[in-house]
Image (tube, helix red, strand yellow):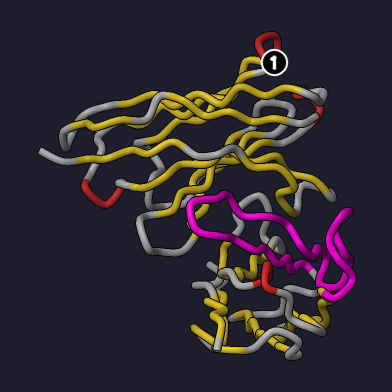
Amino acid sequence: EVQLVESGGGLVQPGGSLRLSCAASGFTFSSYDMHWVRQATGKGLEWVSAIGTAGDTYYPGSVKGRFTISRENAKNSLYLQMNSLRAGDTAVYYCARAVHGGNSFDYWGQGTLVTVSS
Amino acid sequence: DIQMTQSPSSLSASVGDRVTITCRASQSISSYLNWYQQKPGKAPKLLIYAASSLQSGVPSRFSGSGSGTDFTLTISSLQPEDFATYYCQQSYSTPQVTFGQGTRLEIK
């Protein structure tokens, strides 16, 4: 059974840092592109970052230079290092597996809440 | 960036109704369009990929159509478990994807 389990969320002050983790199981992790998607309370879905099987990384302008996605295939783990956090980064963060040529997300974690507040 | 616009933003319907949700892209995205269902407190669930392909395990009452800039998600006969929020997502510019703002489907 495919499972994605996020951890590492919590309360952090503006300007602070946080590292999220996503533990994958039930599939060959190294063979899939992986993504982070976030959702502020009551709002829609926003793509945050992606990492390919070769370790290539991608970000939208809203987080580029502040967030870093990485993966450790030996540990079946995905990470998101978030620096210079802002109130607008407050959201539930989901990790998701990309399929169908990397074009859609068939499995998602349960999400981890990040709250940026003083 | 490719912008995705869904309509309506919310919709009230009854069990057994046929429902259609529309998604429009700001530029042509061929058939690189996916649909997700999200229930409160849960992660999104993939329903339709590549505009019209049904994801494994998804009931056949869900269908998708369209290409270019205009797409639709249709639920042929609403069931109680279908009341949720639906999102479209473009993957033309993958991995840099974008989502629509969502359509909330409520019980009338």
Segment tinted magenta in the rendering: B32-61
- Residue A13 is left or right of residue A17, and the answer is left
What percent of the width, then of the height, locates residue A83? 30, 30
Nearer the observer, A62 or A40: A40
Residue type at tag 1: Asn
Which residue is pictured at 86% across the width and 66% down the height? Answer: B59
Which residue is pictured at 63% across the width and 79% down the height? Answer: B25
Tally the numbered discs.
1
* Element class at badge 1: helix
Nearer the observer, A47 or B7: B7
- Residue A11 is left or right of residue B60, and the answer is left
B91 over B72 or under it: above or below:
above
Nearer the observer, B45 or B25: B45
What percent of the width, then of the height, locates residue A15? 18, 34
Nearer the observer, A87 or B40: B40
B64 over A84 or under it: above or below:
below
Which residue is pictured at 70% across the width and 61% down the height? Answer: B91
Extreme-left residue of the structure: A118
Residue B54 is one of the magenta-drawn residues: yes
Residue corresponding to mark 1: A73
Which residue is pictured at 42% across the width and 45% down the height? Answer: A92
- Residue A7 is left or right of residue B50, and the answer is left
Q: Quadrant of the C terminus of chain B?
A: bottom right
A47 over A55 or under it: above or below:
below
Q: Residues within 10 Å of mark 1 (few under 14, many from 20)?
A: some
Residue A96 sits in quarter? top right
Residue B68 is one of the magenta-drawn residues: no
What percent of the width, then of the height, locates residue A115? 27, 40
